[in-house]
Amino acid sequence: MLAQQAGVRSAEAAGKPSFSAFYGAQRLDNGSLASTSSSVGINLTIPIFTGYRNTYQIAAAQTQAGLAAAERDRVANQVALDVWRAYYSVKSETEADSRSADLVESAAAAEKLALGRYQAGLGILLDVLSAQANLAQARQTQLQTRLGLRVARAQLAQAIGDLSWDWLEPAQQERKR
């Protein structure tokens, strides 16, 4: 962006008069013949008519600067979008993790009830096996949602540019439960 703005200033300056000065000194020594020469001069350049070349160069440089600004804004918007998507993914996965924990708790209670009914002679073995299968499915779902939550946290950390282990801390605390 700064380079394009400098290009605009350079194109604008190319169309303005310029002034330069120079000085040169030279000494030649060929043994018996020695000579010294020096020169001083000034140079003034005034562009009178360049066929609108400078105007087009300024317009082109301004267009390049505008394109660079648009690209900068596009990248900034994309980063913001990535961060918001990752944030809402974490939020969604946190809710799913909470629901899966409730599902495991409910399936464990149903399995305990079916086993108790079977031991009391009021239920059949098929009900116990079905409840145990439901509990296993609930635990598998819980593991998948916890994995999804960890992935979502890592994606959020990447989106905001912070890949420290602090983002995995809540996941380590869940493992202790």
Image (cartoon, helix red, strand yellow):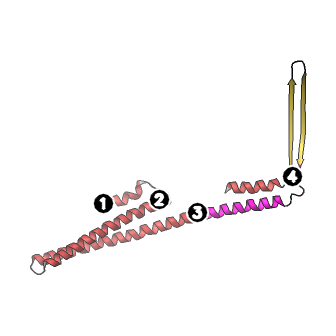
Task: In the displayed orientation, state which residue is furthest to the top.
Answer: 32
Sequence-first disc among 2 and 1: 2
* Residue receiving disc 4: 17
| Nearest to N terminus: mark 4 or mark 2 | 4
Task: Specify the quadrant of the image occupied by residue 2.
Answer: bottom right
**Alpha carbon separation for disc pair 3 and 2:** 16 Å
Write down the region rendered in magenta: 45-74
Q: Residue at x 72, y 63 (%)?
A: 63
| C-alpha gap between disc 4 and disc 2 | 52 Å
Dot 3 falls on a residue whose secondary structure is helix
Q: Is residue 142 above or below residue 12?
A: below
Up-down: is 171 above or below 31? Answer: below
> Mark 3 or mark 1, which is nearer the start of the sequence?
3
Camera-nearest label, 2 or 1: 2
Q: Residues within 10 Å of mark 4 (few under 14, many from 20)?
A: few
Label 4 secondary element = loop
The disc label shown at residue 126, or none: none
Of callouts 1 and 4, the N-terminal one: 4
Q: Quadrant of the N terminus?
A: bottom right
Q: Residue 60 colored magenta? A: yes
Considering the whole magenta stretch, tell me its main secondary structure: helix
Residue located beneath label 2 in the image = 158
Residue 48, above or below 40: below
Residue 75's disc is 3
Q: Quadrant of residue 8?
A: bottom right
